[in-house]
């Protein structure tokens, strides 16, 4: 083999080695870049996944809280309906009193009204048949009552009017007054 052929062969071998080294280095660089990009993609995926999980958990908490609030509100509404019904039943029971019970109520309440002069007695339409002018004339009171020809529509009980000041003894008003005072206590006793 001639010297030229040897030099050519050495150059080929050296070029082949350099090419192999270049290919190896390029392959390693590409693999390293791929791994780096793969790692970045994995990190981004994890971050995005975590954000979505947090968002889903936040929505779940909101829905859960909303459902709990709605349940509590429904429960409170139901309890309020029961209390309202209790007071409505009390009013209806009072309206259904026998005439003697209605008169006994008036005989207890009328002397407690702090009047000295004259006043007008206005019966409720539902109890007008019991609270008559004759009934009023039988009472011994520290003031004089004049029986009104007018009645309070759709009500049971009575109103005493003295110079624009009204003493309201209509059963619906009495129950409403008691309801505003006792609702909380009753709710505590019944549902607490």
Image: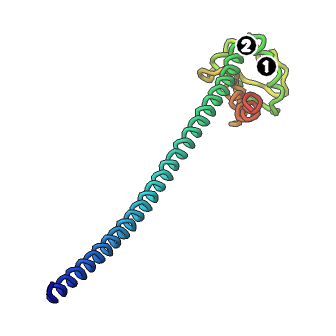
Instruction: Give the quadrant of residue 32.
Output: bottom left
Q: Residue at x 50, y 53 (%)?
A: 54
Q: Residue at x 35, y 66 (%)?
A: 34
Q: Nearer the viewer, residue 61 or 15?
A: 15
Image quadrant for the C terminus?
top right
Q: Which residue is mark 2?
A: 97
Q: Which residue is mark 1?
A: 105
Locate residue 66, reporting x and y percent: 54, 42
The 10 Å Cα crowd at callout 2, few under 14, some 14 to 19, many 20 or more, is: few
Locate residue 171, reporting x and y percent: 69, 24
Against 35, residue 147 (above or below) is above
Instruction: Give the quadrant of residue 124.
Output: top right
- Between the residue at mark 1 and the residue at mark 2, the CA separation in whole angstroms equals 10 Å
Q: Nearer the viewer, residue 5 or 91?
A: 5
Single out the mark in the foreground, 1 or 2. Answer: 2
Q: Are marks 1 and 2 in contact (CB under 8 Å)?
A: yes
Q: Residue furthest bottom?
A: 3
Q: Which numbered disc, 1 or 2, marks the residue that appears first in the sequence?
A: 2
Locate residue 185, reporting x and y percent: 76, 33
Q: How many tags in the picture?
A: 2
Is residue 99 visible from the viewing direction of this image? yes
Q: Give the side of residue 74 with respect to residue 178, left or right.
A: left
């Amino acid at each position: 083999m001639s010297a030229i052929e040897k030099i050519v062969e050495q150059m080929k071998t050296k070029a082949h080695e350099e090419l192999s080294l270049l290919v190896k280095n390029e392959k390693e660089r590409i693999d390293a870049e791929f791994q780096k990009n793969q790692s970045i993609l994995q990190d981004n995926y994890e971050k995005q996944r975590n954000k979505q999980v947090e968002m889903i958990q936040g929505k779940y908490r909101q829905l859960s809280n909303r459902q709990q609030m709605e349940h509590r509100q429904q429960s409170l509404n139901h309890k309020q309906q029961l209390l309202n019904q209790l007071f409505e039943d009390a009013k209806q029971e009072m309206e259904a009193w026998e005439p003697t019970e209605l008169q006994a109520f008036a005989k207890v309440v009328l002397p407690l009204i702090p009047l000295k002069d004259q006043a007008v007695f206005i019966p409720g339409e539902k109890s007008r048949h019991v609270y008559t002018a004759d009934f009023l004339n039988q009472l011994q009171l520290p003031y004089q009552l004049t029986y009104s020809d007018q009645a309070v529509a759709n009500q049971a009980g009575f109103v005493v009017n003295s110079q624009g000041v009204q003493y309201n003894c209509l059963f619906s008003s009495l129950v409403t007054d008691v309801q505003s005072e006792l609702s909380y206590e009753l709710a505590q006793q019944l549902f607490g």
